[in-house]
Amino acid sequence: MRTSGLNNFAMVYKVQTSENRYLAHKLGFADVNINFNEDNEAFNVQLAYALGFEKRISLDDKLMFVHGFEPSFRVSMTSTTSNRNVLLRPGIGYILGFQYNLSDVFYVNVETIPSITANYILQQENSNSFSLNAGYASNVAAITIAYRFEKRRN
């Protein structure tokens, strides 16, 4: 489980590809809002996926520096009685973080991901729009608490 605050959870599944190299699959169900009243119906849902290419550098027997590229994609749909918008957001980021091994099976990870994203908004009622964003938010750090599963060898 991974979170950057108490409102942005993602499931993370990491696969070791070689010594100190991992693929990190991150699937986020970012937000769901449904509102119904007499005059208006509104619905919003966001889904996100990222694939991190992590490299780990051992700093001591329990602490590792983690870094690597992370392409991502987010889709969001907002629908009201009078309008429908779809946001497509591909991006590329760079993972910067630290992992502390609590035991052989548990670890804690803290990371931030400076990134560049493109936003393409498809609008039902208005013209479509495109924007490009680049940034680093030093106040956004994700904390991961993980359990390490290992294959048993016979």
Image (tube, helix red, strand yellow):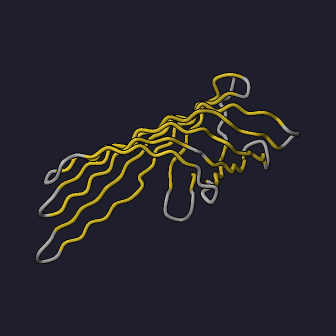
Left or right of 104: which side holds 33? Answer: left
Name of the residue lying farthest toward the bottom:
38
Q: Nearer the viewer, residue 8 or 13?
A: 8
Q: Is residue 64 above or below residue 40?
A: above
Residue shown at the point (63%, 30%) measured from the top left: 22
Residue shown at the point (57%, 36%) measured from the top left: 24
Left or right of 119: which side holds 19? Answer: right
Query: Residue 7, position in %: x, y?
Result: 49, 63
Left or right of 138: which side holds 50? Answer: left
Q: Classify the position of the C terminus by image quarter.
A: top right
Query: Residue 47, position in %: x, y?
Result: 37, 48
Q: Nearer the viewer, residue 117 or 54?
A: 117
Residue 120 sits in which quadrant? top left
Query: Residue 14, position in %: x, y?
Result: 59, 36
Residue shown at the point (88%, 39%) measured from the top left: 60
Residue 96 sits in which quadrant? top right
